[in-house]
Amino acid sequence: MRIVATVVLLAMSTAATVVSVVALPYYDAKTGRVEPHVWFTLGLWMLFALAFLSLRKVGGKAVTVLVLAGSLAIGVAAMTGPPNTSTDSARYAWDGIVQNAGISPYAYVPTDPALEDLRPDWLFPAAVDGECPGERIQTSREPGSDTVVCTALNRGTVPTIYPPASELVFAGVRLVVGDEAEYWPLQLLGLITSLGVTIILLRLLTKRGLDPRWAALWGWCPLVATEGITNSHIDLFATLLVVIATALAASNRVWSGGAALGAAIGAKLIPVIAAPALLGRRPLPVIAASIGIFALLYVPYVISDGIGVLGYLPGYLSEEGYESGTRFILASLIAPGFASTVLVGVLLVITAVLVWRKTDPANPWLGQLAMIGVTLLIVSPRYPWYALLLVPMIAMTGRWEWMAVPLALTERLLFPSLEFARLTVFLAIVFVVVMTIKRSGPGILARVKRELRHPFARPVRGEATPIE
């Protein structure tokens, strides 16, 4: 009966995922079509929580079977329709098409007439009576003219923002499936990547003598299905590389771990926050290997494009408010404007140093949880797929309360209210802190006082520290 209950809940999660992908309109806060996505997302997270609670009562090998089967079923369900909250994968496809034509994705903007012959109809449909048809299609213009270009790309007049490792993935996918295949190839890659992370987590948990049920926090997570598979964000691939890097570093294979970390950074840059937790045992090999792989990935593009390899990254950071500090929804309450950026930078540096000094090299998962989780809470990005990097660390540590972070960031995307976003992020911080204090037991105050006296001292093997 316990197995049956879990199967029923997973079937409901799978069916709800299909409906959310197939039946709901494309999410667009500008048109006010917000409520269906908000309620369905809430329902998916509730079913996810109930299924995980039900799994706790299941024993034996059935746990592994259910974790894998649920991950597969929900992942396939997430592929039943096109992207529903983001068009980033349209840019992924275009970058791959351009590269396979022998052109650097950093050299031209997508609406440049020089690339007109490369444009497939599903990415660049023809205008109808001067209007661009389709809910995912945006109206853009050719550089230096008023010629209208209809495109599924969300920034058709700027060069790509994605680093070389991602670009190689985009090119590889399009080399296999061709130009006319639409969104499903990247969704399939997302499914394979998601299953790969699930399998790795199951193996690592079992090897470390931990409960394999925790792998369900990744395999069944609505964030993984919607943003990793349906919307095919490349962050999923970067997450796989970070998990591999952390596992390798934990087993004292620091050169390999550093190389995997460098590849992850070369895929999305954000995984650089995973570095501090991997530096404890032998920092120099990790740093050297990661920088070496990162540089190697960039070499062909730098030779071709020079400084142009930065693409739209500087413009993106300015556009999103990271330079001015307006993007930091909590820090800006304390230090408005550019001072908010300075405050966030100081907090992140302090966190990184503490994680580096306090993380047990044989068990870097807690350090990763602290570094990635605290970064997400401080920065509070409006894009929940950044939190994909956090979910495997939650699974490896069993600190389920940190799931409040991706849930809060998901709310920020779907519910366009700055005040409500601040409230949900603040509540996530309170919940994580309260649960951390509860886990630490009655001796936490003494340990905190000891840490305040020697904040950067390395822990004695076996001694519990606040980060542990």
Image: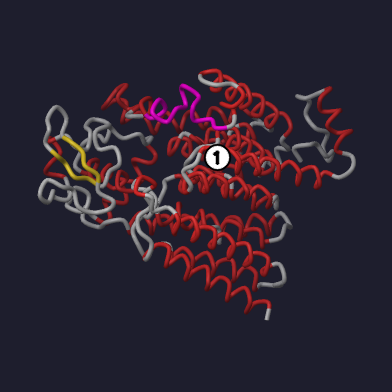
Identity of the residue drawn at 61% across and 57% down: 217
Secondary structure under tag 1 reads helix
Q: Position of residue 351 (x, y in %)?
A: 66, 29
Decide whether residue 382 is among the magenta residues: no
Q: Amino acid at mark 1?
A: Ser
Judge by depth and name the residue closer to the eye, 264 or 354: 354
Residue 443 figure quarter: top right
Q: Main secondary structure of the magenta part?
A: loop
Specify whether 221 is left or right of 138: right
Question: Considering only vertical position in the picture, is 268 above or below 337?
Answer: below
Placement of the N terminus among the 4 image quadrants: bottom right
Identity of the residue drawn at 51% across and 20% down: 337
Q: Position of residue 96 (x, y in %)?
A: 27, 45
- The segment highlighted magenta reads 316-329
10 Å crowding of disc 1: few (<14), some (14-19), many (20+): many
Q: Which residue is denoted by mark 1 in the rendering?
A: 256
Specify whether 457 is left or right of 31: right
Identity of the residue drawn at 63% across and 76% down: 5
Specify whether 368 is left or right of 224: right
Judge by depth and name the residue closer to the eye, 21 or 204: 21
Placement of the C terminus among the 4 image quadrants: top right
Decide whether residue 326 is among the magenta residues: yes
Question: Considering only vertical position in the picture, is 63 above or below 107?
Answer: below
Question: Considering only vertical position in the picture, is 307 above or below 438?
Answer: above
Q: Position of residue 311 (x, y in %)?
A: 32, 29
User: Colour scheme used in the picture?
Assistant: secondary structure
Q: Position of residue 10 (x, y in %)?
A: 56, 70
Identity of the residue drawn at 61% across and 41% down: 423
Q: Residue furthest bottom?
A: 1
Q: How many marks?
A: 1
Judge by depth and name the residue closer to the eye, 463 or 398: 398
